[in-house]
Amino acid sequence: MQREIKISFKAILAGCAADVFSTAVLFSVLSYYVMVQKGFKDSSSPEILGLQISNAIHDSPVLFGIQTAIGLGCSILGGYVAGRVAKQDEVENAIAASLIFVAFGIYAIIAGSTDAIALNVFSTLITPFFYRLGAQVRIRQVAKRSR
């Protein structure tokens, strides 16, 4: 007999919110660092400034690596938070939360995002794995406490 999986809408929203908020904060810090280091003027239009920062990050392997690590780390955090809020079926809730970002990734690919298509496809495909990793961290944390 199969057991019923309990998906928590609250856990999904909490995981997504943790991912979005932490990503926004850390990307803002990285963008500000790039802006200062490269001497970009904040008096430029936001579109031009954003393009300059994006180009500078993509032109530097180190900055691009940092940007990628931030994105993946925030996905792990999102999975952890989803699992923690759900309190059961942590992995399933984390994967459900990741599917929202997978949907956004698919939309960006179909809509023809200005980023490299291979990078978009790759990041869209690996998102659930990093959310699962976050849920696994939560499961191990709970297991250690119950010993």
Image: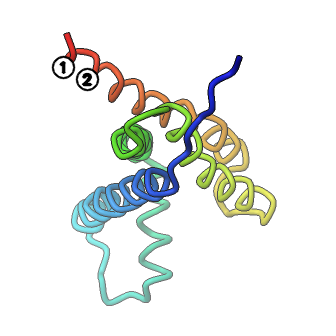
Q: Residue furthest top?
A: 147
Q: Residue furthest front?
A: 1
Q: Amino acid at mark 2?
A: Gln
Q: Residue at x 40, y 38 (%)?
A: 83
Question: Can the viewer see residue 57 in this picture?
Answer: yes
Question: Can the viewer see residue 63 in this picture?
Answer: no
Residue 122's label in the rendered image is none
Question: SS of the residue at dot 1?
Answer: helix
Tell me the quarter of the picture where residue 134 sits. Answer: top left
Question: SS of the residue at dot 2?
Answer: helix
Q: On the image, numbered disc 2 is attached to which residue?
A: 141
Q: Amino acid at mark 1?
A: Arg
Q: Tags 1 and 2 in contact by the CB under 8 Å rule?
A: yes
Q: Residue at x 36, y 63 (%)?
A: 24
Q: Position of residue 147 (x, y in %)?
A: 19, 9
Q: On the image, numbered disc 1 is attached to which residue?
A: 145
Q: Is residue 49 above or below residue 87?
A: below
Q: Number of marks in the image?
A: 2
Q: Position of residue 91 (x, y in %)?
A: 50, 31
Q: Is residue 134 above or below residue 27?
A: above
Q: Position of residue 41 (x, y in %)?
A: 30, 81
Separation (CA) of disc 1 from disc 2: 6 Å
Q: Residue at x 63, y 48 (%)?
A: 99
Which of the pair 31/145 is nearer the observer?
A: 145
Pick the quarter of the image with the N terminus: top right
Which of the pair 138/21 is nearer the observer?
A: 138
Q: Is residue 130 above or below residue 63?
A: above
